[in-house]
Image (cartoon, rainbow, N blue to C red):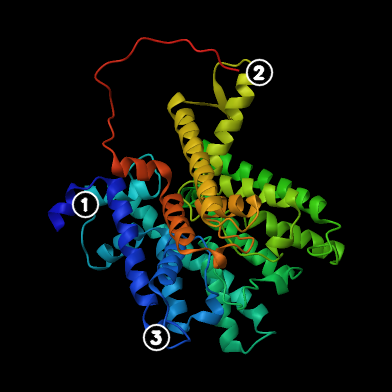
Amino acid sequence: MKTFINKLNPPKALVLGFAIIILIGTFFLTLPIATVDANGLSFLDALFTATSATCVTGLIVVDTGDTFSIFGELVILFLIQIGGLGFMTFATLLFLLLGKKISLKERLLLKEAFNNVTIAGLVKLVKRILLFTALIEMIGGFILSIRFSFDMPVGKAFYFGYFHAISNFNNAGFDIMGDFKSLTEYVDDPFVVFTICALITIGGLGFIVINELYKYRGTKRLSVHTKIVLTTTFILTVGSTLLIFLFEYNNSKTIGPLSEWGKILGSLYQAVTPRTAGSNTLPIGDLTHSTLFLIIWLMFIGGGSGSTAGGIKITTFAVLVATMWCQMKGKEDVVLFRRRIVNETILKALTVTMCGMMIVVIVTIVLSLIEQRHSFMMYLFEATSAFGTAGLTMGLTPELSTGGRLLIILTMFVGRLGPLTIAFAITNRRKTEAFRHPKGKIMIG
C-alpha cells in the first residue's frame, strides 16, 4: 500500500486523499446516530452532504439543522475543517505530533495543496496556518456566541457561534439555523454581518497572503501575489456591494423594507458570501436577475489561491483583466504592480478560466436535460455554485433528481481540487516536448 502511494504524483495523491475522506464521511453520516431520525440518511444524501462539506461548498439536499444530530453535525464540521485546510495540513500535524520527519514526497504534496511555488518553508507555514486558523475561529466564534446568547440558551449559543465561525472561515456556508433559513434573521445585525464577512474574507485571502501580512512588520514587503489578492478583493467587495445595493434597493422581497443601514449590511453580506462561502442573509430566489447574474460571476471568480475558497481564483481574474487591458493599449508585456507577468502564468490563467467555463456550460446543459422543470437561470446558478464551491442556491438543490445530485457531487469535487489538478491526475504531464512545430499565423478578432 505504501509503495503504491509513493508511486502517485501529487495531483493523484490529492484526488485520492479527498475521495477517501469523502467516503469516510459518507459512512459516518449514514449511521443512525448521525441523524435525528433513527432510520438514518440514504447513501446518496450522505454522499452529497459529505462531498459538500469536504469540498467546503455548502449545497445541501437536507437541512443540516433539522436533519442531523449533534454527532452528525460534528462529523460535518470535521469534514469542513479538513476540506478547508486540506487533508495534508492535518497529516503534517499528525506527523509532527508523532515526531515523524516530513519527507520530500509529503512536502511536494503540501506544495501542490497550497498551490505554492516552492517547497521551502512549507512545514513552518503549516504550523502558522494551524495557529492562525485556531486563533481566527476562536475570536469569530466568541463574538458570534455572545450575539447568539441573546436569542438562545448560552450553551446552544456557543455551539451555534463556533459552528458558524468554523463553517464560514472555511468558506463552507453550512448553517444549523434550521428550515433552510440560513442567517436571514440577522440580515441587518452588524455583529453577525461584520463578523461573518470578516471570517469569509480572511479565509478567502489564502494562507500565503495571511502569512505575508503576519511577517510584514519585520519584512516591510509584500509580494505581487499578495498585492493582487488584497487589491482585487477590495475592489470586488466594494464594487459588488454598491451594485447589489442599487439592484435590490426597491425590491420588497429583499432589502426594500430595511432601513438604509440595513440595506447596506444586506448588500455587503450578499457581496461577500459569493466568494464561495454559501451562507446568505437574503432569500436568493427573490433576488433580481441583475443581482443573480452578478453573483454568478462572483461565484465563478471565487477567492485567493491556496485559500479555503473555490472558483478560478481572483489572481486568475486579475491576470486576465490586466492582459486584456495591456493588449488594448498595445503593450507587449503584462505588468501588475511594476512586475511583468510571465507568459506561462497568463497561459495557465487562460487554461483555468476556459476549463471552468466549459465545466459550468456542460453541467448547465446536462442539468437542463435531466431536470426539465425549472428556469435556465436556476441551472446556471446551481452549476456555477457547485463549480465555485459557493453553496448558494435558488432552491434547486433539494429538488434534484438522482442524476442531478450525482452530477453536482462530481462538479463540487472538480471545483474544490481544480480542473488542472484533476487533469494532471488522470493524464501524464510532460514538462518538455521532444520537438516544436513550425509557427502558424491565425487572424484573431
Real-space CA distance between mark 1 and mark 3, rounded to the nearest whole angstrom:
39 Å
- Where is residue 5? Give x, y as percent: 19, 53
Q: Which residue is mark 3?
A: 33
State left or right for residue 194 relative to residue 168. right
SS class, disc 1: loop
Label 2 or label 3, whichever comes before in sequence order: 3
Q: Which residue is mark 2?
A: 329
Q: Residues within 10 Å of mark 2 (few under 14, many from 20)?
A: few
Rendered-image quadrant of the N terminus = bottom left
- Where is residue 59? Give x, y as percent: 53, 63
Q: Residues within 10 Å of mark 1 (few under 14, many from 20)?
A: few
Q: CB atoms at circles 2 and 1 under 8 Å apart?
A: no
Comparing 386 with 16, the one in front is 386
Q: Is residue 220 visible?
A: no
Real-space CA distance between mark 2 and mark 3, rounded to the nearest whole angstrom:
63 Å
Real-space CA distance between mark 2 and mark 1, rounded to the nearest whole angstrom:
48 Å
- Comparing labels 2 and 3, the label whose residue is closer to the camera: 3
- Comparing labels 2 and 1, the label whose residue is closer to the camera: 2
Report the residue at 52% width, 44% height from top: 313
Q: Is residue 313 above or below residue 282?
A: above
Q: Which residue is mark 1?
A: 103
Counting labels gives 3
Give the residue type that dot 2 points to: Lys
Label 2 or label 1, whichever comes before in sequence order: 1
Q: Residues within 10 Å of mark 3 (few under 14, many from 20)?
A: some
- Comparing labels 1 and 3, the label whose residue is closer to the camera: 3
Give the residue type that dot 1 points to: Ser
Label 1 or label 3, whichever comes before in sequence order: 3
